[in-house]
Image (cartoon, rainbow, N blue to C red):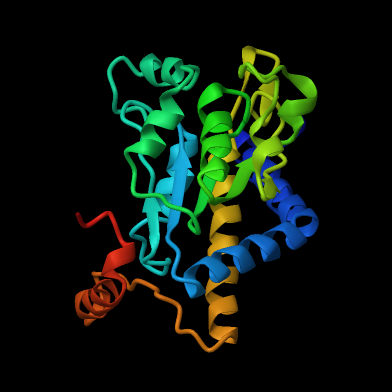
Amino acid sequence: MSDGTPADLFFDAAIGLLQRVRDEEGEAIAAAGALLADTVADGGRLFAFGAGHSSLAAQDVVYRAGGLALMNLLAVPGVVGVDVTPATLGSALERVDGLAGAVLDTSPVRAGDTLVIISLSGRNALPVEMALGARARGLKVIGVTSVAYAAETTSRHSSGTFLKDHCDIVLDSKIAVGDAELTLDIIPAPFAPASTVVTTALLQAVMATTAAALADRGIEPPLLRSGNVDGGHEWNGRVMAQYGDRIFYRR
């Protein structure tokens, strides 16, 4: 680790990754925003899925002030975060064959919807099968992953493929294998993960692009306002009433 405090070095690393994503993923971000806008305009529904810490970025675009009201969380019990005990169960469930199909079969997804799947490595059975199953059911899939894992690791799915291989659009987070940005001689393992910072920013860039794309088509984006500003609850109530048939986190 070079000169500078660990905090400074982490900020530098995160900012560098954000700049790479901005500079290198612009076309994919625009395409993802256009796809979400197409889905909204055509009457489809929007879903986001992530397992473990990848779920944090999925949750950040659901029921979010300043975000699209139509984005729903596709939750898999036991893998939504670290709230399950033991926390290692979530990691084990990501490797279970068939779980994604069972989730999709009991979810409200249908042909014409779009599913955003977030998986840093994209190598486990759950995200791979989620993408395969979603596309088989007529959904469009946007994958948010680190493409580097496909070059430097092996798939844990029987097909030998990764999430990136089963998406209509792939957003590459540029995160290095291992998700740790810093090293220090007196610390035996690399540390300071940046995947949540980068992936969340990447998805918010897509949400912003979607809102602008809808507005360009003459469609008012179904955006939520903060409930902590005057009139926020009333605004959100109107949006949810208008789009209630496509919002599932209130049921």
Residue 234: name its quadrant: bottom left
**In screen coordinates, is 17 left or right of 224?**
right
Q: Nearer the viewer, residue 90 or 194?
A: 90
Q: Residue 187 vs residue 226: left or right? A: right
**Which of the image's four quarters has the C terminus?**
bottom left
Rendered image quadrant of residue 91 = top left
Q: Is residue 1 above or below residue 246?
A: above
Q: Please, is residue 116 above or below residue 240 in the view?
A: above
Residue 52 location, x and y as percent? 44, 30
Task: Evaluate whether residue 198 shows in this view.
Answer: no
- Identify which residue, 173 or 193, lies in the foreground: 173
User: Residue 38 sits in which quadrant?
Assistant: bottom right
Point 48% across, 46% down: residue: 57
- Residue drawn at (59%, 77%) of the image: 213
Residue 243 left/right relative to 163: left
On the image, the x and y values in percent for residue 211 come to 52, 74
- Residue at the spot 38% in from the left edge and 44% down from the top edge: 74
In the rendered image of this protein, does residue 206 appear above or below residue 139?
Answer: below
Q: Is residue 27 above or below residue 173?
A: below
Q: Residue at horizontal 24%, vertical 79%?
A: 238
Q: How many marks?
A: 0
Q: Considering depth in this image, is 91 or 192 the residue closer to the camera? A: 91
Do we see residue 145 in this rendering? yes
Q: Quadrant of the N terminus?
A: top right
Q: Position of residue 188 (x, y in %)?
A: 63, 10
Q: Is residue 81 left or right of residue 120?
A: left
Find residue 214 and report its horizontal and vertical position in percent: 54, 79
